[in-house]
Amino acid sequence: MVGKIAAPAIAARFARRSPKSKEAECESVTLKSDLDADVESKDGGGALEAKMSLLNGCTVIVGSIIGSGIFVSPTGVLKYTGSVNASLIVWITSGIFSMIGAYCYAELGTMIRQSGADYAYIMETFGPFAAFIRLWIECMIVRPCSQAIVALTFSVYVLRPVFPECEPPNEATRLLAACCILLLTFVNCWSVRAATRVQDWFTYAKLLALFIIIAAGAYQLCMGKVEHFTFEGTTDSVTSIALSFYSGLFAYNGWNYLNFIIEELKDPVRNLPRAIAISCALVTIVYTFTNIAFYTTLSPTEVLGSAAVAVTFAERLFGWFALSIPLFVAASTFGAVNGVLLTSSRLFYAGAAQGQMPAMLTMVTTRATPAPAVLAVALLSLLYLTVSDIYALINYVGFATWLSIGAAVFCLPVLRYTRPNLERPIKVNLFFPIVYIICTVLVVAVPALASPAETGVGCLMILTAVPVYLLLLHPRTKMNCLEAVMHRATYLVQKLTMAVRPKVKMFLHVNTSDHISDYSKPDQSVPMVYDH
């Protein structure tokens, strides 16, 4: 167990915030220092708090799904389908497919109400090794890389009015991207309420821009502008069709992000499925009608040749108003960076709560924010800003995201068989997860076969999780020499962030019970305890 971390000054600050009250002692072993004991209070001792409403949940999902792609380059689907009508069918089908996955996640999220989403579901179903592979690639590459890329897109569009005739300097874009990440890191460390308000308002901004485009497209339809809506040129290649669905589904990525922060959602049994259903339906409608609007004015050739489709569309219809489109794109990406940071930090938190990440990442401040986890995501994102070609890096492991989502959905029928007595507020017909799993395998397999070299590199990067797990986590082979270093690092982080570990117990996976452990309750007891 990590040694005692005594810091009277920090404890005094927590004590001033709320009076101390003794909790019943746990019968099993917990990860608790003297400082943790000192700050136990009736307000939860720094635990994450359920402050997010249904509206906040919807804006997290919508804001995370809608980034810059729909404004800049919604061309991948058209490129592979070959015709406008076929591309619209793919957009609608991809939205329905995402809603099926979200429906499955609604059962998993209301059954396993723990932050971490598919990481938590894989942990409960397949154990710590499979869960760590998911955690490793997501935390070390996918999330920080994605955040850095979206931040770079934000900076490019903020600087576009300053450099109208050329691309902004590389140094300027990366510096502004770093400022964006640091600003949102401060907001997320300061207050969950502030972070959700940022998410709310920037989601409203991006939806306003898209509704303006949709309204203009509706006017064009009323004027009879339908000449581009044909099936002419539709491909008959199975590979191209699969790649078009891959592009469409990638645009919907983010529909599962609310599951990552479910512990902070009010009444999750009621609000999680509602937020998922409302958000996925809204995004599907918005994406479909936005594409229809583009094709009322632009030909398929113009769409494929445009560097920024929304700007070209606005220049054709609105004239000077086109100058505002880069600002709307910047607002959209700013909100997306916030959404990635908000949800990714909870994945780090969940991994630490399971003992698979440093224990310092479970620490929560007096303002109920997991500041160390937020800082960890931000630092990794800033590190990736220094990489010259992070786009190639994310392409290598992009398929891992769909594999992990497919694995999480596969948990649903497995848990139905292995743990039939679990409480399931929502019970999905098994037809839906089976269809989703089959389609996910096809969507992942075809692009993998089309680009075997990239897939091979991605698999090697994923397999780097194996030696890390054996050296640092496996009870028989792990290296214990790092405990002193982690002790000092934990002590330093605790002093810097004024945070403590919440009343959380870190358990290894136990697959012998029909009860899902609630790690937020101090009197919870399960057979096996993970001891740092």
Image: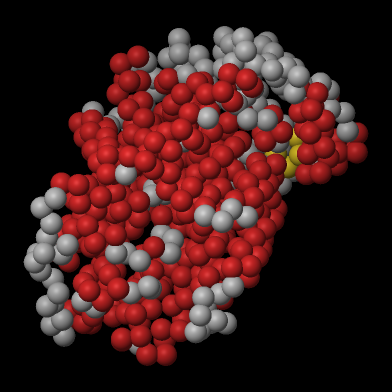
**Image x and y of residue 236, in percent:** 10, 53
Q: Is residue 362 visible?
A: yes
**Image x and y of residue 501, in percent:** 72, 32
Residue at the location (59% across, 68% down)? Answer: 170
> Which quarter of the rendered picture does the N terminus lie within?
top right
Residue at the location (33% across, 58% down)? Answer: 283
Colouring mode (rainbow / by chain / secondary structure / one colour): secondary structure
> Which quarter of the rendered picture does the C terminus lie within?
top right
Residue at the location (33% across, 20% down)? Answer: 414
Q: Is residue 116 visible?
A: no
In the shown orientation, is residue 423 left or right of residue 139? left
**Image x and y of residue 305, in percent:** 30, 73
- The outermost residue toward the bottom is 320
To which quarter of the image does residue 148 belong? Answer: bottom right
Which residue is at the front of the view, 21 or 275? 275
In the shown orientation, is residue 292 left or right of residue 127? left
Which residue is at the front of the view, 489 or 31? 489
Residue at the location (52% across, 52% down)? Answer: 390
Which residue is at the front of the view, 343 or 11? 343
To which quarter of the image does residue 527 belong? Answer: top right
Task: Give the vertical position of 202 relative to 249 (above or below).
Answer: below
In the shown orientation, is residue 429 left or right of residue 188? left
Task: Give the vertical position of 384 relative to 18 (above or below).
Answer: below
To which quarter of the image does residue 269 belong? Answer: top left
